Amino acid sequence: MSFVAALLPVVIYIFVVYKIDNFSLVSVRGLILQIVFGMMAAVVCFFLFQQTNKILTESQSVFFDPIMEEAIKAVPIVMLACRKQIVFFIDSVICGAAVGGGFSIVENIFYLLLGDDLGMGTVLFRGLEVALIHMGCSAIVAACCMLMVRLVGRAISRQKLDVKDVIMTAFLLLIAPTIHVCHNIFHFNPLIQFIFVITILGALLVLTFMYDVDMIHRWLDTGLDQQIGLLDSIKEGHLDDTPTGVFLESVKESFPPEVYFDIICYVQLNIELAVAAKSRVMIRESGIDFPLEDSQKELILSQYTEYKLLEKSLGKTARMTIAPVVKLLPADLKSLNDLVDECKS
């Protein structure tokens, strides 16, 4: 029964966090996989600390252990970020919380097996607090990775980086291990400590969420308006109506007519697919999710197939030339891949 009490808070927390995923960005299989990665990270830390405790003093271990725990837990999260699998706040928090939850499950089991007999209330309370620390810190690290992915995407697309975005990313990267270290060093009344932990982690996640909302609105609203404007100018044959269209006109003489035609078709398909993907995200964000019609799925899949064929035929030089126009940001790639997967299902 003690094992059930120790694991119950983790199960409840993961279930609640997963249920708030209105975007349906994380599959059940992916969630379980992150929990397993977190459990593996805990086992790695257990054997690692057995070796480091022979070298470090107890006071040194208090600082070293939580930092190493956060670093090792971050490995699967960084892998997801590099593969562009976490590009929104909600999926980063879900994946981060899952990794931290898996870690805390194994840690609580080790604590029950190797520690003294404890009462049911103590086991339940400690299980909840440990779950909050590991899941909260891992969620913050995951949110940091999500912001880093966006910064890298903007840099690759030759967009100007906002200093606020860089500062926020660095702040989140440092604050998670700092909270974990402070939790291990300072000990208060258990109830006060629990309230302190949940308040700090909750405030940080709310702050990150609000910041992410601002970035998402910039991506959806501003980017969508620009893309629709360019799409209209292409269809009407008046490229000089928009700054992006003027740029496309300026490179016209650099390519043979047939290649330039393929470039315009490629840009048009990129915009149409991006608008469809962003519109789908906005619909899910509003909580209204309805299946696409078969005709819509066929159209999107045919456009995507033609888009990928043009991408191969254009060549590296042409794609590099129009890189400022075809801005494949991580969020764009994620939303497009989700749309294609939905059409294939």
Image (cartoon, rainbow, N blue to C red):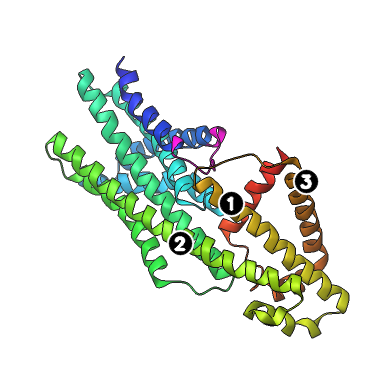
Image label count:
3
Sequence-earlier tag: 3 or 2: 2
Kindly indicate the quadrant of the structure image that contains residue 46: top left
Residue lying farthest to the left in this orientation = 189
Query: What's drawn in magenta, residue-wise?
Result: 19-30
Residue annotated with mark 2: 215
Spot occupied by residue 227 in the image (x, y as percentages of width and height): 63, 67
Label 1 and label 2: CA atoms lie apart by 20 Å
Q: Which residue is at a point 68% across and 63% down the rendered structure image?
A: 271
Tell me which amino acid carries mark 2. Answer: Met
Residue at numbered disc 1: 83
- Whether residue 247 is visible: no
- Name above or below for residue 129 compared with residue 171: above
Residue 298, label in figure: 3
User: Type of residue at label 3?
Assistant: Glu
Residue at the (42%, 55%) spot, across then down: 144
**Badges 1 and 3: C-beta atoms under 8 Å apart?**
no
Height in image: 115 above or below 260?
Answer: above
Q: Which image quarter: residue 120?
A: top left
Whether residue 171 sits left or right of residue 91 in the image: it is left
Residue at screen point 47% across, 72% down: 161
Q: Nearer the viewer, residue 139 or 113?
A: 139
Residue 120: numbered disc: none
Task: Pinpoint residue 318: horizontal percent, then vertical percent.
Answer: 76, 73
